[in-house]
Image: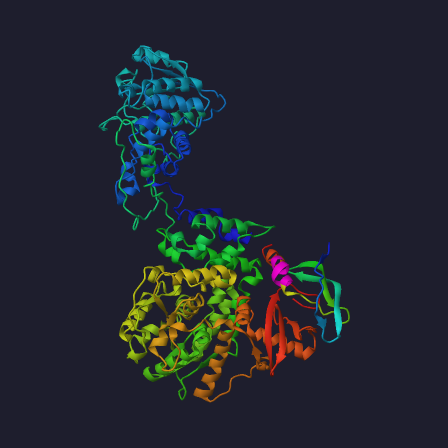
Amino acid sequence: MAWLKAMDQQQLRAIEYRCIQEEQPFCTASCPIHVDVRAFMACLAKGNLREARRVLDRTMPFPEIVGRICDQPCYPFCKRGEIGEPLATAHLERFCVTNSPAVLKLPKLPAKGGTALIIGGGLSGMTAALDLARKGRKTTLITQASGLGGTLKTYTETVLPQKILTEAATLLEGYGVTLQMAVPLDPESIGSLRTGYDAVYIDFDEIKASKIPFPAGQLDPLTLALTQDSWFGGGGIPEGASSFSVIKQVEDGRRAALTIERFLQKVSLTAQREMEGACTTRMHTVTTGMPHLIQILPTDTVLGYTAAQAQQEAGRCIHCECMECVKQCVYLREYKEYPKTLIRKIYNNQSIVQGTRNANKMINSCSLCGQCTHICPHDFPVSNVCRTTRQEMVRVNHMPPSAHDFPLEDMRFSLSEFCALSRHQPGTEDSRFVFYPGCQLAGSAPESVKRTYRYLSDQLPGGVGIMLSCCGIPAHWAGEDALFAKTMDGFRSEIKRMGQPTVITACSSCLSVFKEFASEIEATSLWQVLDTLELPVQPDLLPRQSLTLHDPCTARHQDGLRASVRNLCRKLGLNIIEHNFNGTITDCCGYGGLMQFANPQLGAKAAVVKAQRSELDGLAYCAMCRDNLAAAGNRVAHLLDYIFPVFDAMEPLDRKNPGFSRRHENRSRLKQELLTTLWQEESVMAPPHRDIRLILTQEVQDLLGSRHILEEDVQKVIHHANCTGKYLVNPDNGRWLASYKPVRVTYWVEFEPMDQGYVVHNGYSHRMLLPEEKP
Amino acid sequence: MSTFSFIEATSWQCAGCRQPLKPTKVNVTYLNSVFTVELMACSQCGFILVPEHLAVGKMLEVEQLLEDK
């Protein structure tokens, strides 16, 4: 599998690692035994005491003990502390264990060889005994005291009833631990008791270091090994610590049990133990904008919380997670993924040899806009992964043919003789500059292209040529490397032919492509050029109200371009109010990455999300953003509408989305008109089907648009029917039904002749081939 | 392979042959898969009718399924 070569498991892991959504929350990381405090709080907040108790039972060795007296080392790490007091976790644990019976009884593994002796009955000795017994090791606990607990016995009856310690002893015996109480212990007896056991653990909470039969020396903090082989120790108050910590006892007992288990298995005592005990986390949680909530403490510390108080306090938990990219990205939200799970699905999809590749549409639905990467604290490259995957899908012939067919045909049309044009300024032989409006501006607002060209020709010295073309970004987005490379080659040779002029482009996508893939060619944005010139300001034609500016996603990394746009707005006297999701974190309108073609519903949603970033009428300077926001029902103008306004033009904010057919028409007509008016030349003859006059209601136009059927396709079908005489008729209503397959798609049109034209009633298409059709 | 039938009463007639359409077995293909289906077609010239509901329904569904294979 070639794709696997392109990204092997190791690379996958390296990329996955950048996504920190699955990192431990701050409370769990700082807890020496990693209690899932976040899940605990979620259950309590829902009032589900039983499930909250299950969370504690899963991790705490003696929940009835630890839950009552936990010293909550997580407290200072709680993210809620940034916006109020941290969660009162210890109080909530106590509420939970005092109000709910045990839910989980942790399983015991079958008995194995190896014996362990625990000397000292404090909480660390008890924990070590429990953990070892659960692992199937024959374990004996010996204490001088008459019962278990060590320092725990000093807690008052109200805080920790004696009954709880007795029950803990019963629990240990239940797991098969042999308990020996009231055994006199001194160095000599300890030395002799040790005989017959493979490993021994000293609980320093009960046994002073001086009582062991050799100099204790320094404890190894990772393994808790003492200076003599097979001796381990922990618990009590370690050197340098100021007070007794309950959770430290648990941590030591658990750590020692793990060491002894490894010791008995004769494996490394030290390998891969970094995540044991309190550790750091890469979790990233933003609390900005979250409400400050007052900490709820129990009215009476001994009686503890009421159920309502506990629920309210647990409800303050902010459930730390990252999701910063998902919060903003319509695509990740739609597929309910965060980058780590997304890339895993993509990897699995590409590993399928035979079977259905269910993630194809997901891979093709990303707008490749890079917003998530910019937001991510570790620059997770979602767009890069999606785009390179598309390249690989094309390479191995697994790209669904329908995904990008329409926009790639649209691109071919823009590059065809019907639309493409490059000329020096009339009357000149050289071009110091060439104006490159981009295919979408030519399609959306051809009049703006003409006015801008006239202005640039008048203002800039040295000749301003014009180039109507397409930069090839649709092919780049579609993973069509060969087509993209060919398009770039064509651009390069055309620029060379024109004498290497500086390219002035109105489209930030074109500019991003030229900068990345043709860096040897000098290219700049129209906005930066206009920013240096005197503008034809006409205040009477400007809107009175405030507008919000919508940066396009391809301007994300073009700071100078964005700054010039703002300068231009200021010079014009436009009242711009910026919304919060612009600039480097701006959204895509749905066109990026060809999202709106691979997934039309999602593309429409993306436009709505972008528009809704502000309640104000909008101002765009990308023709696709302008049209997609308009299509989503918003009032939005293009910056050129105000730089080069027309007196009798309709309100720029109310201009409709022209749709695919009109864009086609506009592009070819723009070439025609420029040729006729500026160079007194004729454009190429339009093919005969273009003369067919269509009569369409808005409803039919919208239907055809949504089905990606161009009016030119309809003309081809009707032309074909007329030429061949092959069509169906319905005698009931006089309508005709005909089909034609110009390239890969078969179009069907239902129509009727009327007034030297045809009323179009319906259109649909399929890609499946009928017997007489050739692939 | 079994034949899927999409025959239905239709008002459409072949304009060239002036014939009503009749159920006809045909092979439709997509991405190396062949399906025998029964569609309405002109018995004289063989012009096949693909009705809208079939094109945007079952046919589209199968096309997309095959594209992901």
- Left-right relation of A261 to B34: left
Image position, residue A102 (x, y; %)? 41, 26
Q: Is residue A505 visible?
A: no
Q: Residue at x 22, y 28 (%)?
A: A242
Give residue A149's quadrant in the image.
Answer: top left
Image position, residue A104 (x, y; %)? 44, 28
Give residue A34's quadrant in the image.
Answer: top left
On whether residue A286 falls in the magenta region, the answer is: no
Which residue lies most toward the right here? B44
Give residue A679's quadrant in the image.
Answer: bottom left
On whether residue B57 falls in the magenta region, the answer is: yes
Q: Residue at x 45, y 67 (%)?
A: A631
Figure colour scheme: rainbow
Q: Nearer the viewer, residue A629 or A491?
A: A629
Q: Main secondary structure of the magenta part?
A: helix
| Depicted A408 relative to depicted A208: above or below | below
Q: Is residue A445 visible?
A: yes
Q: Nearer the viewer, residue A72 or A190?
A: A72
| Depicted A538 relative to depicted A76: above or below | below
The C terminus of chain A, quarter of image = bottom right
Image position, residue A712 (x, y; %)? 56, 75
| Depicted A145 relative to depicted A290: above or below | above
| Depicted A65 relative to depicted A767: above or below | above
Q: Residue at x 37, y 53 (%)?
A: A379
Residue range in magenta is: B53-61
- Counting labels gives 0
Image position, residue A684 (x, y; %)? 54, 83
